[in-house]
Amino acid sequence: MRTLILTTAAALAILPAASATPAAPGPVAAPQKKKAPKGYHQDTRYGFKFKQPAKFKNIAVRVREEWLAAKYVGTQQFTYTDSKTGATANHYPEFMVIAMPHAAMEDGTQVTKDENGDENVVKISNPYRDYDDLLKRTFQGQGGFFLAEDPVETEIDGVSVEKRTYRSDKLSSAPLTIEAWIYKTEDVDYVVHVIGLTNHWDAVDKLVTPLRTTFELIEKDAPLRITSNLEAQVRLGRLSVDAADKREVRSAAVKSEKVIHEKAINKLPDDWDHKLSGRVLTVYSADKKFANRVQKHANNLLDWMDDNFGFLGGSSYLRKPVIRICRDDAEYFAYLAGINVGNGGGYLYVGEELVTRWDSAGWSGAAVDRLNNQIYDYWMQERNFDLKTALPQWIDTGLKRLISYSRHDSRKPKWRLDANLIAYGKGLARSGNTVDLKDLFTMTEKEMNELQQGESKPHFEGWLLVNYLSSPEIKRHPLAEGLLGTYLRNMQTVIKEIEKEQKRKLDAARRQASKGDGEREYAALRRQIFEKMEKELLQRTFDLTFSDFSDGDWKDLNTHFRKAF
Amino acid sequence: MLNALAIGTIALASATAHPRLAGLNAPAPGGQGRSILIMKDGRIFTEFGLEQGTDHVEVTLEAGKVEVANELVEIVLKEGQEITFTPQTDEEREKYEKGFVRFNGRWIKTKTAQRAIEKELKSRMEQAEEDLAHQEWRNKYETEAKHFRWFHTTPQRVTQRFIDSSDAYYDIFKKDWGIKRNKRKPKLSINFYNAEAEYQQVAGAPPGALAYFMFLGDYDLNAFYDRLDPDFTEQVVFHELGHYLHKLIDEQFNYPHWPGESLCEYYGGARLNEATGKLEVGLIHNGRLATIKGQMAEGEKIELEKMITTRGFEDYTWGWSFVHMLMQDKSRRKNFRKFFLGLATDKKVKRERGGMNLKTVSGEEVLRYFMECMKIPDRDALRELEKEWYTYIDEELDFDGENALIWEAKTAKSLGERDKARDLYKKALSENFDGAPAKAHYEYWRLMEEQEGSEAIKHLRAAVKKAPLTPRYRWKLGGILEKKKKTKEEGAMNKAIAQELDPRVERSSLFD
């Protein structure tokens, strides 16, 4: 079931304004859709329809997706068994409809003029030159592939159609066949592509026959326009070279939240629902009871983060995240496999949606742990983007790991012990391969990686340290109590100093990102700059925090830390 | 769309090396047939106008003309061309009047020479067509060699080098280590791709993996031919082959990182002696030596015991040098052989289950068995051996070949030491600017801080001069020249030529 939000504005897509000042997106409206015939998938934005094959489920498309018009995953599982090793792999066939407007394919840039008449060239991320190019860039990680047969040209209802057949049989879990039918019109190429196990291809082909025989192009509501990723992200003023007015940043945040929410809702398939409650918008195909539990948990966790890390200050407005809850694993992985790669969950940048699913391990399982990771990343990025993109990895991961084991769906938060980490720590202590706390605080990622080659495991020790400094145990030691907060505050101070020293580079990064992939790119560039300064950041923070620590104090703290586990 | 393949250097006579055949470029009577340019690096160009000059071939594209030095050209072929001879000396004139010409060191009848040349050119043309027809993976060549099955999109002529050297490697390893292939299993499939882009797409290789050996199920090796560095390609193939050959000792056993990787590196630096058909092993691995010498210069030394018992990158570098020392010493070589084979087969070795349910040996057990086989009684003796090893590196191992500095630079770059790599390239290129390969100039440019100044342009121009039909080099040069008023037109032409050579050059260049 799906509810459309109707507003009074005309445009669905945000118009580009590739200038240094933040764009003010227009209000968004859902298009007036013609009703599809029963059993048909009809899309008047992209301009096609087809009869939905039985045994296939419509999978939601991500907010960032512009090229992907429809995605379906089969409900029937097929199996491949390797005759040499006996290993098996299961696969659900899938098909997608991809629209490739010629204008976007020919030139990956848009040129606009700002109020001074200066030209700004905005690169459209991930423009694809043709279907081959799209496949090369989106099939990554699923194994190698090659064009297995000579392409076949034909004509269907007066439209020139090319059939291309690929095989994937190296470094894939099972040999796959990819068959693409490319409908070539004057302004847009439509690709209907199907993926299935090679050893079951005849059966897969039979299942998708209704799709092939009924696929037809129909009239579009308006000329098809693919917007740039920058528009989809909606700048918040973080990319502005000059310090942005706080009210302006807040206003831009509120507006972008509205755009993202409406986009998320408008792209929902018929069997999805949504609910805005508290600080979270959930869109879900999972069981409603589970969705409500996730929503309550997410709301409380955000409150908890504000209560416990609010001292980190930063942005006053935290955009309500979209949490997408898929019905099961199959839908979840199918959803994440898009053709705009790189959304969400990454260490460097969390996208517009946090994605999870119901999994058979239940509420205490890895799916909710993973959601917590995303909520942590999201909160940090929204509240304090600058700190998040400069924080040394071991601290960031330590905090994330800590929060992943919490559950906030009841009145009081519940915490699960990170048993694996603790067991690991105990093992390290027994073998004498521990790192001194004093050294740990000034160890860079590179140094940790080098040490990790041997018997010591400084990453694990770092995460243990964060765990310890957040635990009730610290109340028993005067030096440990409040130490994490002090340390992070001091780190923030040092970051601001370094920002002044590296202003030229950071400004250049902002300018580059403004013309490129926006915030996502800026996060990566900023991270690179701070990685080069990591030793200095750690040392200066250390000097600020521990200037009055004696050798005896360190020894004491070390002992207490080790004993805590 | 351009048809281009990558193949390596071969020792075939080039038609351009017959100065007497001045009529080779004369247009065919009644009009021009197709022209084919075959490069020594294996690429075949069929769509351009070609004119043979004294020391170069002039290639005419729609975007402009490019001069390609003769030393880069294997042969220029023109369909239907008339073969004529132009005597240069009195003796030749005299013989020519009698109906004879000098051909391949002998005087033969003019008509016979003509027929011989026509036959050779026809054969070359047919082979070029064959190679073009096999450049898509679905139409790949399948070549059965003595010990391996090759699947490749590289032309036959180029692949032969690797086929021969790989067979030679198998032969020598079999002789040295007594391996045996289970004849009920097929020969190892070697998938050899004509360019990195094809390899990454078809083989599904992760970024940074230059080649890989699939050691489960039907064994499978995948590598690509880097036409700008065929020697390095061979090293990479040999390294991966090493893992396969180790497997033949015991297929249920997975060699520990040390000595497995180190022995792969030892043979990785081998070269085929074309005269004898045998593999020369024990050569210097310049890249690895560069890493070790660099670390030693900074006061870093890897402890022998630590190297033997733990897994680390040093197994490729320091480990190689240690194995080199053992293998070059006759009596130690014998004991090391016993050790290496025994790790997999000796009943006295304590093994455990590792990944993929294969047997392996722990670091401590590797050390124990090593000391037993090498007759090292205690830790003190081990430390003495360690000292001997450091001295060996210092005094016995030295760089081989004129491009040693470039090897050092490549190694530094691969280790993320950009500043060091840049300084090494700078030194290498200042000592031998003209003799350095195109890739060295280009890689140096990539590391420069100032990439658009005169120094940068100088190196890009050198790269383009040495590899005039390499799209990426022209694209980058063109991009810089285009920004300057004086060279705007030249820049635009370079970019246009680059795009004509490869319409996707803009996108692939983004990853530089």
Image (spheres, coloured by chain):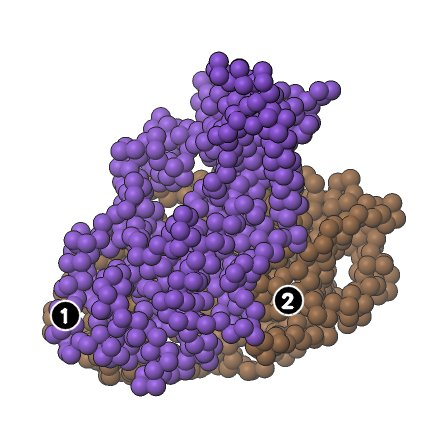
Instruction: Compute the Cα span from label 1 to label 2.
Output: 52 Å
Q: Which mark is residue B191?
A: none
For the image shown, how many numbered marks are present on the structure? 2
Secondary structure, mark 1, is helix
x 39%, y 62%: residue: B172
The residue under the point 82% across, 56% down is A215
Residue B166 coordinates in the image, percent (x, y): 46, 57
Residue B328 visible from this viewpoint:
yes
* Up-down relation of residue B278 to residue A227 (above or below): below
Q: Quadrant of residue B242?
A: bottom left
Q: Is residue A531 above or below residue B133?
A: below
Whether residue A489 appears in this view of the structure is: no
Read off the residue under disc 2.
Answer: A175
Could you say which chain is coloured brown in the image? A
Check disc 1 and report the residue beneath it. B383
The picture places residue A1, in percent across and down from the top left corner, at 74, 69
**Extreme-front residue of the structure:** B98
Q: Colour of chain B?
A: purple
Q: Above or below — where is A277 with respect to A246?
A: below
Q: Amino acid at mark 2?
A: Pro
Residue A250 location, x and y as percent? 49, 51
Q: Is residue A326 left or right of residue B510?
A: right
Q: Residues within 10 Å of mark 2 (few under 14, many from 20)?
A: many
Position of B470 relative to B139 (above/below): above
Quarter of the image with the C terminus of chain A in it: bottom left
Determine the chain carrying the residue at label 1: B
Task: Give the amino acid at mark 1.
Answer: Arg
* Along the line of sight, the residue nearer the viewer: B461 or B342: B342
Depth order, front residue of B422/A245: B422
